Every structure is written in structure tokens, then in C-alpha cells.
Amino acid sequence: MHVPTHGTRPDHGFDVHPWELRWRGFDIDTIGRTEALFALSNGHIGLRGTFEEGEPVDVPGTYLNGFYETRDLPYAESGYGFPEAGQTVVNVTDGKIIRLLVEDEPMDLRYGSTVEHERVMDFKTGTLKRETLWTSPTGRTVRIRSERLVSFTKRTVAAIRYEVEPIGEDMKLVLQSDLLANEPIGGPGGKSAADDPRLSAALDKPLVADLADCEDYSAVLVHHTRRSALTVAAAMDHEIELPASGDTSIRADGDLARLTVAAAVPQGSKIVLTKFLGYGWSARRSVPALRAQVDAAIAMARETGWDALKTEQEEYLHDFWADADVEVDGDSEMQQAIRFSLFHVLQAGARGQSRAIPAKGLTGPGYDGHTFWDTETFVLPMLTYTVPAAAGEELRWRHGTMDKAKARAAELGETGTMFPWRSINGDECSGYWPAGTAGVHVSADIANATARYIRATGDEAFEIECGVELLTEIARFFTGLGHHDANGRFRIDGITGPDEYTAIVNNNLFTNLAAQQALRDAVTAVGRHPSVARRLGVAAAETALWTSCADDMAIPYDESLGVHQQSEAFTLLAPWDFERSRGRYPLLLNYPYYDLYRKQVVKQADLVFAMYLFGDHFTPAQKLANFDYYYPITVRDSSLSACCEAVAAAEVGYLDLAYDLMSESVFTDLHDLHSNVSSGLHIAALAGAWTDCVAGFGGMRDFGGAITFAPQLPRQLSYMSFRMVVRESRIIVAVDSESATYRLMSGPTIELAHHGERFILGDTPVRKAIEQPTPKHPPAAPAGCEPYRRSL
């Protein structure tokens, strides 16, 4: 496959550049895709990359983390324990809109002539820039420049600078800067609303007006949702630069606040509007209190000013890249895609402030804005070793929902905490229980993320306040859920693992290993903090039970085939006819679950993923045998799969295949491989870019707090470096085809290992040789499921 060089434009529409994403030209058919790709967020506020003029638009998209409306869940037949209500992310009051009229003609790229048009997302400055040269249907030409940001340093603030310059003649220009609530939701990215009448009803004008006020150049709107009873406030204020006097007016009423600026602008001059936005929401605070909050946010933004907001944004990102950057040589488009991925993962989680990280971040309405196991298992590993404060905040959100998790466990007759499969506020929102309620590994995933965070950061305050309790209640859940059989094995039956094509099984290996680790981490945590253990009522007999359950955990293995079983008796199931399935992927849209559940076909990496997360439970020979067995039956109908398989392929020596699988994960959104980017980005797949570089080709593992590396590069790359933070030690690992060099940039000395050889990293860099791997020929993928190939 041709790999583009720096500066060229591949077929997917973007110029290739290591630190930016640039799109040239206007194509109406791509606006849904680019709205998601150009979305800006700080984890609290999310603005899709729509045009300031409001139209053309696919999905308008202004989101606040955790803000949702409630809707009924559909069931053909109801049953005890089925969740009754779902939650759907709401498009809140849109402050991105700045309409332009050129001599009474609305600026709209669908009309007239777009002479020049480009948009640039800058990964160093954290802004989205746009420049357009547009000629109206009556022949008047204007140049429009805009730049927007969602502040990382001031989480309730966003800002836009918008300027218009007449070309060739004097013109009368009008700008209309809006706050607009209850925008119509349509287009490809919003189809789910039309397909589901319950969802459509929930999103049909979901906001009820409480307050509208304006003064001078500022305005505020406050609304609440009908069913979830959440209140949201949005405010705007402006700075206006005119070449001469102009006329301004402002109004606010119900769902619309609008500042109108009209001016005669000579050629060679321009009109500049700087718009400051403030957002806040609450389930408890009053309308006056929320109004005061956004008024304060606007005052802070105005006092800081546009230039200082940009400077703060750039400084924040400078610090982020110093701890998180991944650099590669040999594939310039890959380099761009990796940094794009890391930037969007940062945007999804940077300033959530004890909120969830949704599967789509705040880039679109996909998955109803829910968070899944994706967060703890795919996203938090990256954040834990690069932006640990963000990882800690997400885990504090999980701890804050424990009352709901305990109530859910009790409702289903279990002890401890049973965390939801999908949710916004901590309540279970999955109406399909075989893949939802039965996916109990999500609780173990949260426990594993908690223990990893504690090991990697040494955050004792978090451990005392949240960590010990999380681990304790999850351990209680699994000891109650499983049982010792007549042979003394501890079994966890009737559950669903990561592979959603094999549901309601006994002893899913991934779940059992995750639960085993959770039990052992709980024993360690209460041992470190006996006073917390006493407060939680943990006695010696209970920790002995946790240890016994962990030690006796059932690990399915097929002796005749010499491979582990994904779940008990999995290798006895009938094979799937993959030739019959060519052109019919994803399978869940073309075959009944009844058929999928009874065959050896895997939706996404399950056992193979377990070999990475719990790799110390497998020998190298077992990892190779398992990969060779499961890769040919895994169809990757989920964006979560490719990055997991890439790590495993790299470890067992299939480096070309690992690179192709990494490419599939990294380019999932940039190349729209699943044809659904318009509904939002796949944040877990984007986090997979970091995982594939650091854990895949870097070979990084953290078992029990021991940080080890086993780096080896694929032939497509001549160099790779990555950065990590471990207990305040900031390290850089640089790898070429012959050696790896480890550098400590700041912090205390740290013990590491290179291909099993332990060493202490201090002020002096450590260089270690890398043995050239013997090329191996991997097994074939299922028919029609070949990876996204970049290797020749």
C-alpha cells in the first residue's frame, strides 16, 4: 500500500502533517464526518465542528458531560430486573452560531461560489481554524477567518474569534451571534432519533425555558429537561471591532438570544467579533445559582481575553505533549493519525471533573452518549500514564455512583456493587440483558483500572477515599456471584465476556482472570489500610474467602487442542462458515444472535485481549497457540478489537500483522472505516493508538507495579519514541531497529526491565540492544475480514 509522504494529500481528504489536521475545499457529502473529526472538547464542554454560520449542518452538537434526558426503554416482553429507563445525551444550547449576511444575502456554502476553503485542527494550540473565500450569488466576495477553542484551563469556557473582510468593494455586513436552544436534529448522524420513536420523543425540543436575559453585548439562557430534571445555563458576551461606527442590538426570548451587529465595511478593512461562551449544568442548583455560575465564567473569560486564552491553551498542550507524545519515523500519515488520536483522547477526559468519559467523547450522539467498559479498559491506561489526574477523576465518578451500583446488585440478588454495562449517570441503561446486564466483567474492569491507577500514581488520598471501597465492594460482588463446585474450582457461570457473539456462558476466561485480579487487589488494598477495612466491615475471614476464590478460579483449557478456551466448552461449538459471510459484515446486522451464540465466531478480541491485560498467566508458547487459534475466527465487528489483536500479534512475533491491525485501529475514524464517524468518534479505538505503540511495539507491561518493556519495531518504522509518567518519574523510551534508549526526564530514579533484564534508570540514559526478530507467517483472517493493510 502506498504510504503518503509529508505534505501530500491522501485519498481520505486531509493534508498529511505531523501536528495538524487540515481539510481543503467544501464537500457537502463529508460534513457529518468532518463535524466529528473537527470537534473540540475539554471533557466538560463539547462542540462539534459545525460551521459558525449554522448551515449546512449534519448534527449541530453542543454537549455537556453528564447532561441527558430520560426515555423509556423498549421491550417486546418485560422481565424482572430489566432497566425501565434509558438516558440520551442532549444537544444543549448552541453558542457556536455566528450568522453572516452580505448585503442581505445569507452566507451559505451551498450557494454562490466557494473560491477557497480550508479548516485546520492544530494539536499544539488546541484550536480549530477556518478560512473561506466566498462569492455570493450576486457576485460579492468576502474572506472569512474564524478560530475557536474549548478551554482546557477554564473548563466552563469556550471562545470564538470571527472576522469578515470585503474583497474588491465596500459592503454592508450583518453578523448575528446566537444562543439557540432546541435546534432540530437531523442528517445521517441523527438517524437513530428518527428510527426510534422513544428516542425521537426524548430529543424533540428537550429543553424547557426558565430564563432569558440580555444586556449590552451579553445574554444568558437557562433551561431544564422535562424528565431528567437537569438544568443548564448558557451565556455569551462579545468584543466587537469595527472600522467605523455600526449598529448593534440584542434580544433574548425563550430559546433564542441574539446579538446583531450591522456595519458598512470598506474594502481593505474588516469586522471582528470575539465571542465568549460559558456553560454550566446541575441536578440540584437553582436557576439563579446557575445563572450566576455562567455569568462568572463569562467575566473570567472577558478578563482573561482571547489572546491569553490561546496562550494558556498552548501552554497546557505543551505540558501534555511533554508527557504523552509518541513519535514515529517511516510513515508520516501514521504519525499524524497517532497525534490526532492522542489529542482526542485528551479532549474526552481532560476536564471531566468526576464525570464519565463517554464512548464517543463529546463528539456526537452515538451510543446515546453512554460510557461503557471502554473507558476503564482502553482509555484509562493511556490517561493513567500520561494525564493521571484525568484518570483519577473518572474513577472518582465511578466511586460516586456506587450507591446505584449497590442498588442494582441488590435488585438482582447479588452483594457488593454491580456497575452498569452502559450509562450516563450510573444507572443501567442497557435494554439487552444478554450483552448488558450479563457483561459483569465491567465491574472487574473498574477494579483493575483502580488498582492500576493506584500503582502507577501512588495516590494515597484516592486509595483511602475511593480505591479501597471500590475494590472491596467489587470483590464482594464476585465472591457472591461465583461459587466453588464439587471439584473445588471457583466458577462464574451464566455471564457474557467481551465477545458479544458468545453470550450467557460459563467461566469466560477474560472475566475470570479479571475477577481473580480484582479479588487479589482487594486483599492487598485492605491490607495496606486496615482502618478503612474496619470501616467497611472487612474481617480476616472475608479476605481469606477472597484469596480462596482467586486461587481456585476456573481457567478453561482444551488439553486436546492445546489452547485456552474463551469460555467453558467454546472449542466444542460448531464452526462458523466464514465464506458464506463474505460481504455480510457486521454479522449482527445480517444473522440472528441465536445463530451467532451457538458457533465459534468472535466479534472482538476476548481471550486474546486477556493475554495482554493478564499476560503473566500465560506462557509464550500458550500465547502463540491461542493467537493462532482465535485470530482466524475473530471478525472484528467492533472498533475495540484491532488494537487488542495488534498488541498480541506484536508480542508473538507477527510484526507485519501487528502493524496492519494497529493501522485499522488508528485510522478507524480518520478513514471512517465503519462508516459511522458522523455520529461521533471511537474514543477507545483512538486510545488504542497509544496502546499499540507503547504496549505493542514498546512491549510495556505493568504487572504488580513492575514496569517492563520488550520493544521491537515493525519494518515499516525506522524509529519510535514514547513518553510515560510513573509515580512522578517522567521517562522517554526511544526505539530503533537495533536498540532502545531509556531516559529519565524528571523525577526520582525508577527500576525498569528491558526484555527481562532489570536496571535502574537515573540521570544517565540507558541503552539496550534489541535482538532482531525472526519473521513469522501469521494465520489468515476470516474470509472478508482481512485487516486494514498498510504493509506490502
Image: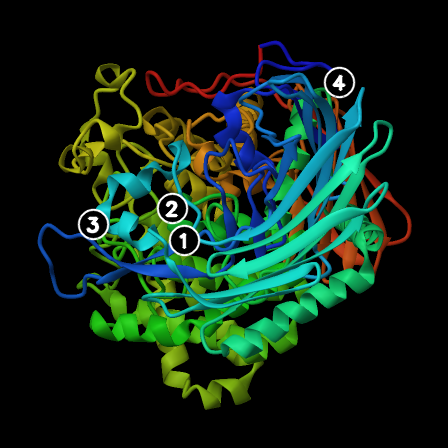
Q: Residue at x 78, y 58 (%)?
A: 729
Few, some or many residues within 10 Å of mark 1 (<14, 14–19, 20+): many
User: Real-space Cα distance between discs 1 and 4?
Assistant: 37 Å
Q: Furthest-right residue in view? A: 764
Q: Is residue 450 left or right of residue 723?
A: left
N-terminal of the two: label 4 or label 3? 4
Few, some or many residues within 10 Å of mark 4 (<14, 14–19, 20+): some
- Tell me the colour scheme of the image: rainbow
Q: Is residue 649 visible?
A: no
Q: Residue at x 21, y 69 (%)?
A: 412
Q: Which residue is mark 2?
A: 367
Q: Which residue is mark 4?
A: 6
Q: Which residue is mark 3?
A: 504
User: Real-space Cα distance between discs 4 and 3?
Assistant: 49 Å
Residue 747 placement: quadrant:
bottom right
Q: Residue at x 46, y 25 (%)?
A: 673
User: Real-space Cα distance between discs 3 and 1?
Assistant: 23 Å
User: Real-space Cα distance between discs 4 and 2?
Assistant: 35 Å
Q: Nearer the viewer, residue 192 or 174?
A: 174
User: Real-space Cα distance between discs 2 and 1?
Assistant: 6 Å
Identified by mark 1, the residue type is: His
Q: Are marks 2 and 1 in contact (CB under 8 Å)?
A: yes
Q: Nearer the viewer, residue 171 or 646?
A: 171
Q: Which residue is mark 1?
A: 370
Q: Which secondary structure lies at badge 2? A: helix
N-terminal of the two: label 4 or label 2? 4
Q: Nearer the viewer, residue 117 or 536?
A: 117
Identified by mark 3, the residue type is: Ile
User: Real-space Cα distance between discs 3 and 2?
Assistant: 23 Å
> Which part of the image, by quadrant, shows the C terminus?
top right
Q: Which secondary structure lies at badge 3? A: loop
Q: Position of residue 353 (x, y in %)?
A: 59, 66
